[in-house]
Amino acid sequence: MDPYVILSYRSQEKKSSVAAGKGSNPEWNETFLFDVSSKDSAELKIKIMDSDSGTADDFVGHASISLDTLFQDGEIPATSYNVMKDDAFCGEIRLSLNFTAQKSRGFDPTDGNIGGWRQSGRD
């Protein structure tokens, strides 16, 4: 088996490298970045696939991870999640998640800009 994963967050999708020849115990050790515009309840969806050359890739299973704890605590340490296929347990996937808020692009009173204009004045 040559597994890879497809991670989906809302309309964004990222694909891992193929762990060629790694069978049912692959390790990817990869980082994926997603843009988060709202911390409303959301899930990270993981689809595990088996890469096949010459034919369509095979679906192995899927997992869904609620991101509420991630947005509240900033991270989820390495945790195992159930992988399901046809509503039946078929294995686990283990991953950790980190959330880092990007600095707002809005108003910053320390940079001297007000409303998009640099403040000027006369003495």
Image (cartoon, helix red, strand yellow):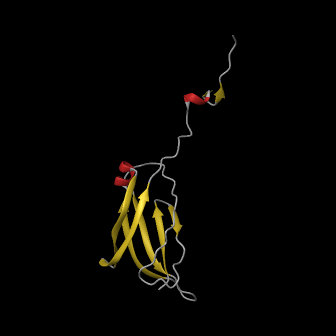
Residue 29: horizontal and vertical position, in percent?
49, 68
Q: Nearer the viewer, residue 56 or 15?
A: 15
Residue 21: horizontal and vertical position, in percent?
50, 85
The correct choice, above or below, for 57 with respect to 75 in the image is below
Given the current orientation, which residue lies at the most extreme top position? 123
Can the viewer see residue 101? yes
The correct choice, above or below, for 108 with respect to 95 in the image is above
Given the current orientation, which residue lies at the most extreme right position? 122
Residue 33: horizontal and vertical position, in percent?
52, 58
Residue for point 57% across, 87% down: 53
Q: Is residue 7 left or right of residue 88?
A: right
Residue 8: horizontal and vertical position, in percent?
47, 64
Q: Is residue 70 left or right of residue 101?
A: left
Residue for point 53% across, 86% down: 52
Q: Nearer the viewer, residue 105 or 93?
A: 93
Please state the total of marks drawn on the protein image.
Answer: 0
Given the current orientation, which residue lies at the most extreme bottom position? 54
Can the viewer see residue 84? no
Quadrant housing the C terminus: top right
User: Which of the 4 image quadrants contains residue 81?
Assistant: bottom left
The correct choice, above or below, for 76 with respect to 95 in the image is above
User: Which of the 4 image quadrants contains residue 84?
Assistant: bottom left
User: Which of the 4 image quadrants contains residue 94?
Assistant: bottom left
